[in-house]
């Protein structure tokens, strides 16, 4: 493929993944800070994860999106819907904790989750095995950048202005990410062998995901993803409330998780893509997973009263780099396991598992944080993160879950 065509593909994927992260970043990074300042408990804040339910159950409609319509039509419709939502919210007199605000979080999550089905399917079909490590670095980096802009820049805008200005800025950023779609032309989809074809009419599409779940190796990979992600999600869910409880103001957190967070996440995405490309899936997953667990020890030290604000800045930098590297390696493995003929459905199933694990980790983090305190909760999460990483590598060394995974594993 020519370099201009490849550049167009990468620009498209960058914009789409960033678009997913923008509203999600505000609602998952900025909103908890505002609610914590308003006196909400850690457990109550963790319950807001249920508003991210569309990310966990998007596999229910993934086959409909995967096998009906065209990617360009889906993407333009969903991007315009997100822009419209932001513009509509800018005209409302919102208050923290209002039902309308929480309903908007749910709708934004539904739109972004559906857009993700289309985008992931495109990525699996467009990229070959050698490219996935580098491209997953771009994928994770763009999504993280969107989250940081939403949770950092938009929080800063809100702190300096109001809901109206903040949602107008969100609409403008979403419109910018839509531009590459306007110039995109859909590639042909690979044919589905008759023996493997899911039912593609009527209500059968609603259960097509079940056939993919029961395909060889899929359930084993689901369990391994849970092991790899649960501990780090437990720790990550507590970081924003922890920073707030340490006395950091909204603007300081915006800079820490925005300017610093975006830079380190982008560095981590680039390093993760390079590492996965250079040393393969196995070593990238092992090295980045253990490095992430080691980085969490900085938060344990901070929770014990060591290091002060300087340690919090250091922990943010380390977490941004190694956490993103670990995500890149895991997502490359998930793409390896996705059948190109069912790309959107397969990858969506695995991505839904990641979201479910995130929600369970967030709930566990909130409960443990309230019950045991930050230091103990961080310690539990760190141990689980390290153990899960080692177990995943040990298991795949002995029995890869798919032939496609075996080909890319070493």
Image: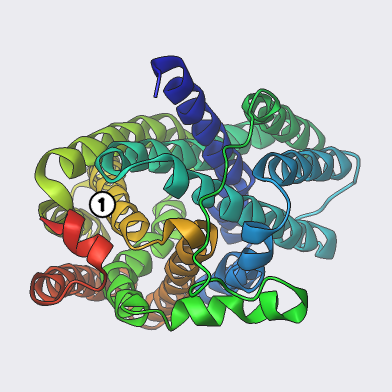
Residue 369: quadrant of the picture? bottom left
State the residue at coordinates (62%, 66%): 63
**Viewer-closest of 106 and 165:** 106
> Does residue 387 lie above or below 326 as drawn?
below
Indicate the secondary structure of the residue bearing disc 1.
helix
Q: Is residue 9 left or right of residue 94?
A: left
> Does residue 147 lie above or below 216 as drawn?
above
Q: Is residue 369 left or right of residue 407?
A: right
**Viewer-closest of 46 and 404:** 404
Q: Residue 336: x and y, percent?
A: 31, 57
State the residue at coordinates (75%, 33%): 171
Q: Residue 182: x and y, percent?
A: 70, 26
Q: Residue 311: x and y, percent?
A: 22, 44
Q: Residue 274: x and y, percent?
A: 20, 35
Q: Where is mark 1, residue-wise?
A: 329
Regarding residue 329, the answer to whether it shows in the image is: yes
State the residue at coordinates (74%, 38%): 76
- Coloration of the structure image: rainbow
Name the quarter where the C terminus is drawn: bottom left
State the residue at coordinates (65%, 60%): 67
**Residue occupying the far front of the picture:** 194
> Does residue 52 lie above or below 72 as drawn?
below
Regarding residue 48, the answer to whether it shows in the image is: no
């Amino acid at each position: 493929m020519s370099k201009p065509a490849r550049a167009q593909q990468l620009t498209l994927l960058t914009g789409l993944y960033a678009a997913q992260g923008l509203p999600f970043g505000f609602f998952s990074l900025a909103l908890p800070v505002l609610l914590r300042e308003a006196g909400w408990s850690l457990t109550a804040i963790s319950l807001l994860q249920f508003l991210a339910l569309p990310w966990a159950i998007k596999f229910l409609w993934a086959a409909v999106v995967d096998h009906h319509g065209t990617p360009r039509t889906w993407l333009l419709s969903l991007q315009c819907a997100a822009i419209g939502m932001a513009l509509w919210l800018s005209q409302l007199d919102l208050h923290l904790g209002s039902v309308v605000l929480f309903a908007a979080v749910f709708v934004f999550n539904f739109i972004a989750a559906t857009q993700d089905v289309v985008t992931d399917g495109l990525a699996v079909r467009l990229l070959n095995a050698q490219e996935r490590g580098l491209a997953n670095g771009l994928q994770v980096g763009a999504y993280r950048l969107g989250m940081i802009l939403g949770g950092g820049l938009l929080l800063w805008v809100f702190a300096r202005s109001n809901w109206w200005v903040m949602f107008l800025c969100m609409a403008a950023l979403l419109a910018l990410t839509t531009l590459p779609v306007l110039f995109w032309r859909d590639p042909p989809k690979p044919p589905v062998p008759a023996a493997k074809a899911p039912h593609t009419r009527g209500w059968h599409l609603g259960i097509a995901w079940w056939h993919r779940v029961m395909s060889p190796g899929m359930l084993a990979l689901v369990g391994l993803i849970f092991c790899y992600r649960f501990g780090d999600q437990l720790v990550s869910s507590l970081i924003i409330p922890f920073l707030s409880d340490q006395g950091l103001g909204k603007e300081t957190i915006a800079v820490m998780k925005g300017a610093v967070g975006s830079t380190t996440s982008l560095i981590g995405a680039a390093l993760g893509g390079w590492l996965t490309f250079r040393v393969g899936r196995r070593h990238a997953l092992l090295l980045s997973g253990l490095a992430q667990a080691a980085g969490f020890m900085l938060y344990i030290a901070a929770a014990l009263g060591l290091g002060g604000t300087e340690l919090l800045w250091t922990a943010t930098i380390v977490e941004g780099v190694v956490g993103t590297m670990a995500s890149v390696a895991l997502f490359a493995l998930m793409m390896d396991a996705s059948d190109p003929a069912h790309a959107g459905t397969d990858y969506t199933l695995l991505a839904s598992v990641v979201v479910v694990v995130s929600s369970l980790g967030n709930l566990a983090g909130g409960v443990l944080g309230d019950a045991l305190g930050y230091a103990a909760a961080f310690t539990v999460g760190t141990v689980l993160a390290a153990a899960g990483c080692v177990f995943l590598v040990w298991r795949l060394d002995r029995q890869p879950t798919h032939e496609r995974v075996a080909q890319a594993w070493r």
